[in-house]
Amino acid sequence: MPIFIIGALAFISLGLLFYSAYPFLERLLKSWQKKRIAKITPKLDRMFVDIPHRKLLLIDIACPLAIGFLAFSFTKTIWIGVTAAFTGLAFSNFIVKQLGKMRNKKFASQLVDGLMLLSGSLKAGLSLLQAFEALVEEMAPPISQEFSLVVRENRMGVPLEECLMKLKRRMECEELDMIITAVLVGRETGGELTVIFSNLVMTIRERSRLQGRIKALCTQGVLQGRIMMLLPVFFAIAIYKINPGFMNILLTDAQGRLLLGYAVISQIIGTILIMHLSKIEI
């Protein structure tokens, strides 16, 4: 039988196989995408980010394709493009996570001004819930959005303590944990909230100042770790460009490869230790 007839039959067979399996593959792909979108949508809802489902699905499909196409355009290698496309599947989750971190950071930076506004409202004779309403009107998002949700939940009959605990679970912020704990204790024991808020403002400011000082002191260690990580690589590249034969002994000789492996492992361990010791949490 001629080769071209065998090839044509094989091509037709593969086409029929793909045609018969296409509905199953389509259902599988849609189910997988729905699960991905179902994980992303609640996170966006918690951040008050409203993106239509169809547009979110389009972004989730377009990002991996765009990343794979760019990788293939730069490298001209198919397997790198395919690998980059599969890696791009995590791009949506990465963006959502970064948006959440940025929002939490902005929320934490607004807490001092929010506490001062709450303290002033309480001194003016308003109740705590009315002070929250004033904060919602005067402050910018995200703090206004979160306390607006607290106010709406309380109006619907949810106890204020429970509303604050929900806010505490939504926002991962140590300063907010201190504020809510102090408010709940103050409401139970009858403490004066204006004094509590004033003390909390001083505590948060002092904590921020201490964190900034520690971060400045740790910057030198982080920079040293990055330099120690990159310097041997650039040095080896420079030596190889100047005198390629000088590095051959490390690649061809058994003892040279052993020493090279030891140097790489030691470099990685040293970099990890420097970066780890340069991180201090308070």
Image (cartoon, rainbow, N blue to C red):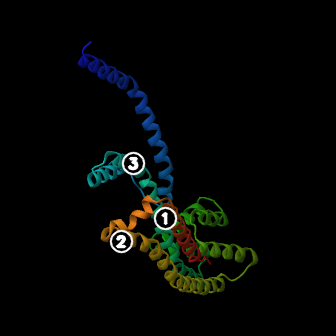
Secondary structure under the numbered disc 2 in the rendered image: helix
Amino acid type, mark 2: Ile
Q: Which residue is mark 1?
A: 260
Residue 239 image label: 2
48 or 23: which is nearer to us?
23
Amino acid type, mark 3: Thr
**Going 62% across and 83% down the picture, which residue do you hit?**
200
Secondary structure under the numbered disc 1 in the rendered image: helix
260 or 195: which is nearer to us?
260
Q: CA distance from mark 1 to mark 3?
A: 29 Å
Q: Which residue is mark 3?
A: 83
Q: Is residue 55 visible?
A: no
Q: CA distance from mark 2 to mark 1?
A: 15 Å
Q: Is residue 33 visible?
A: yes
Q: Is residue 189 above or below residue 93?
A: below
**Going 47% across and 78% down the picture, which residue do you hit?**
223
Quarter holding the N terminus? top left
Please state the horizontal and vertical placement of residue 57, each as a whole percent of the image: 39, 46
Please state the horizontal and vertical placement of residue 217, each as a whole percent of the image: 53, 85
Quarter holding the C terminus? bottom right
